Image (spheres, grey):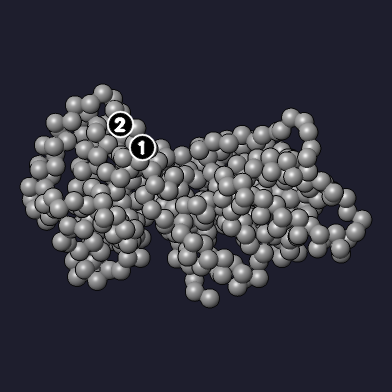
Amino acid sequence: MCVIYWLPSISMLNKMTKKDSLSLMATLVGDAVRKNAGKHKNRWSWYTPFMAAASEAISQRIPVVDFVLDLRDARIPLSSECEIFKRLSSSSSSRRIIVLNKVDLVSRSQVKECLRHFEGQKFPVFSVNSHNKDNIHEFLNFLQGQVRALKKAEPQRHTITMMLVGIPNVGKSALANSLHQIGRISATEKGRLKHAVVSPLPGETKEISGLKVASHPNIYVLDTPGILPPQIIDVNVNANFALTGAFTDSLAGEKVLAQYFLSVLNLSNEYQKWEKLSTPELLVSVKDDNVASHFGSSVNRVLSAEDSLDHTKDSVVRNVRKRLFEAASSFKGNIHNQEELLRLIQTEFIVLKKAFALACWSEEEMNHKVAVKLLNLFRTGRLGHYVLDSIPHT
């Protein structure tokens, strides 16, 4: 069978918008995911029998719990809606609360925009940073307010259950642990604290477990495994899942994911905030054919020990920001042209090798190390704030 790939013409590339350019880059991620995930009995490899069973177990529990906490990643508040909610009747999700997690990774204005969107859809919604104790305390007070309203309508209830539901790596276990810890302290309860397993890797939670978060009435939060749909057709959702860590990085490949992040960075205004880090040094234009050899000679002189610099140090992060600003701001081409955008990204990989002070590995090894470090800095919020979804204006 002959497969024909559509390629936009040069004139169309020059007219492309930011959204068009990101969609083209997202397609590269999606193609890599499809290639590496493979297909088994009409299901992609991320949708394991365990995930199918977890999805069924969660679906059965939703109608019998008192509240469902629909946990979203604030960077992808629309993409990270769990597929299971799209299949529920309105009566099954009448006590659904949308929780925007990881709000420390997006700007306040972006959080407000997301909150307005969900409030416009008549959902109770709360934004939270699972690692901020004051914020968790506020969230717990909010949940107790929801419980008081329920108790007023149904005073016979003495135990309330809330179930956290979301995609992998959205932070369910971290949030459950934080609520449990703050709740126990607030209730001055003694005894050994329980802990849900927390990991930066998706798929670590293997069973539904309950943690007590309040007394009088007793409130329990059920932590659940992350679930994904059997297949993901939308390439942008696919890319967003991969970039934010809902998939294991090996599905798309770290280099492809880093390229996608750099396309997001270059098409945003985040790097412009780092202008003050730049020095009066000559900025080399990426249009210059000698740019690769110019930066490459500097990189090749860096003969450090393996991973010599801790890439999370403030000084290293500042240097990374500085070099990304200089590369992006000196670019004279059309970033809405995918070919030229990829050329800029190639140059950014070169300057990042020097910023991370990598030793003389092979080109493939150094690209991999750059990608891993860059993704870590993005996912920990060290390289700016990004909402990858387009939020409808209400």
Q: Tell me which residue sits at (52%, 40%) in the image.
A: 202
* Residue designated by label 1: 313
Q: Secondary structure at mark 2?
A: loop
Camera sees residue 258: yes
In this rendering, position of residue 296 left or right of residue 364 = left
In this rendering, position of residue 144 left or right of residue 256 = right
Residue found at the very far right of the displayed protein: 156
In this rendering, position of residue 118 left or right of residue 107 = right
Spatial separation of the CA atoms under disc 1 and disc 2: 8 Å
Q: Using the image, tell me which numbered label, if any, was put on residue 309.
A: 2
In the image, residue 391 sits, relative to residue 158, either above or below, namely: below
Say whether marks 1 and 2 touch (CB < 8 Å).
yes
Residue found at the very far top of the displayed protein: 305
Q: Could you say which is closer to the camera, residue 175 or residue 161?
A: 175
Residue 93: x %, y % from top left: 71, 61
Q: Using the image, tell me which numbered label, if any, was put on residue 392.
A: none
Q: Tell me which residue sits at (53%, 76%) in the image.
A: 394
Residue 231: x %, y % from top left: 51, 51
Residue type for callout 1: Lys
